[in-house]
Structures are given as C-alpha cells and as structure tokens.
Amino acid sequence: MMRLWRLSLILASIAATVPGGAQEEGFRPLFDGESLDGWVLIGKRGEGYAVRDGAISCSRGNGGNLMSAAEYQDFVLRFEFKLDSGSNNGLCIRCPLGWGDMAYIGNELQIIDNSAERYKAIKPWQKHGSLYNVAPAKTGALKPAGEWNSQEVTASGPRIRVVLNGTEILSVDTRDITDAETLAKHPGLKRKSGHIGFLGHNEPVEFRNIRIKELP
C-alpha cells in the first residue's frame, strides 16, 4: 500500500512538471531548453537568437527568422511567450525555409504588444494573433508586457485556430478567403505544409515550453 502511495506521488509530480498535465498527451518538445538544436536561423541580425534561462531570447537590435529544421503539415503547437512594452515578432506556420516575407510566401500570425502607444493606429489584422493582412484576431486576452502568455495554434487543413491564455482569438478557414487581390498577395495561404518559425523584428521577446503534436 505504501509503495502505491509513493508511486502516485511520483506520477503526480511528473504530471505537474508538464504544462497542461494529461492534456499534453501526444506532444513532443521543439525546444530542449538548452540549445537551438533543431532550428535554423535565416537572415541573422546582430546575435540573432540566444538561449537564456531556459527560453529562446531575442534581444533589442537582434533578430532574423528562426525556423524549425523539420516541416509540419497539420499540428497543434503550444508555447509560452513574453513581450517587452511595444515588442513585435511573428509566428510563421507552413513557411518555406528561406529568406523572404513570410507573411506572404508563408503564413504569419502576429506576436505583438498591441497595447503600446506606438501601435494605437495599427490595423485590426496587425494585432496579436491575427493572420497578417488576412484575418483579424480578437483582442483583450493578451497579458501586460513582462508577463508570460500561453498560446495554442492549431493548423488542420485550411483551418487555423489561435487560443491565447485559454481564450479563442482567431478561427479562420482559408477557403473562405476569396478576394482575388488578397489571394494574389498571399500565395502562402495555399501551402499545406512547411516550417514553423519566429520572425524577429529587432525587438525583445522570449519563448519557452515549445511543443508540438502532429495531427493525422
């Protein structure tokens, strides 16, 4: 009986160390917390990205596109991020591995502190979680600058869904995008697979607990 009790404590402890506990079944890490193994930096600016205190860090004046070495088709991606006041970055999904504007040749989901004064006049589709220049996300779920946020992105066929801190802020079916001008500017909307990456804009941001579950 005592052995069973100790075993239950051990299992509970293990579950507590994994974000989301049992909900993490099927996920595997994309970031080992210690190195950038499995990532490729394109268009490095300054020092690019570094690993500090278990997080991928981009400091002011540095950046580039930090891309996963592997490609993914349908998946659920979970990660945490922290912004400084006014910081701007981007998450690309199903993107090609190369240099170019991933918001158009791939798909960019905004990562931005849109509460900052400098962004008071930006378009709705430029705010956090939006599919850049295509579909605006709902606002109000982003935590204040300096706090860690939790985000989940699901890409399943033509459907893209973003959940921020437990609130769904974007749900879009790219088949519903029929405007000829938009489709001409965004060939990336037709991509069915590609790389995942962080699009540095020379501003401070940190990422940690990055993990992925590939969907059948």
Image (spheres, rainbow, N blue to C red):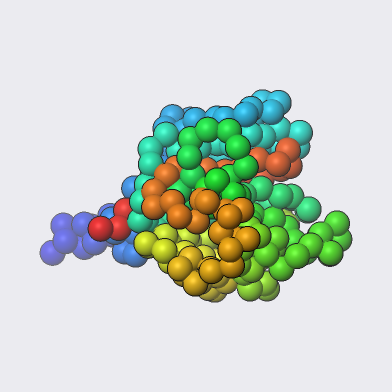
Question: Quadrant location of residue 113?
Answer: bottom right
Across and down, in percent, residue 195 comes to 44, 42
- Residue, far front: 180
In the image, 53: left or right of 214?
A: right
Residue at 61 percent across and 53 percent down: it is 185
* Label total for image: 0
Across and down, in percent, residue 33 comes to 47, 38
Across and down, in percent, residue 21 comes to 36, 62
Residue 95 visible? The answer is yes
Point out the image quarter for the N terminus: bottom left
Residue at 79 percent across and 62 percent down: it is 122
Point out the image quarter for the C terminus: bottom left
Residue 144 visible? The answer is no
Q: Nearer the viewer, residue 104 or 165?
A: 104
- Residue, far right: 117
Residue at 31 percent across and 64 percent down: it is 22
Across and down, in percent, residue 118 comes to 85, 57
In the image, 172: left or right of 46?
A: left
Q: Nearer the viewer, residue 73 or 185?
A: 185
Residue at 57 percent across and 30 percent down: it is 42
Question: Is 184 placed above or below 44 here?
Answer: below
- Residue, far left: 1
Question: Quadrant location of residue 164?
Answer: bottom right
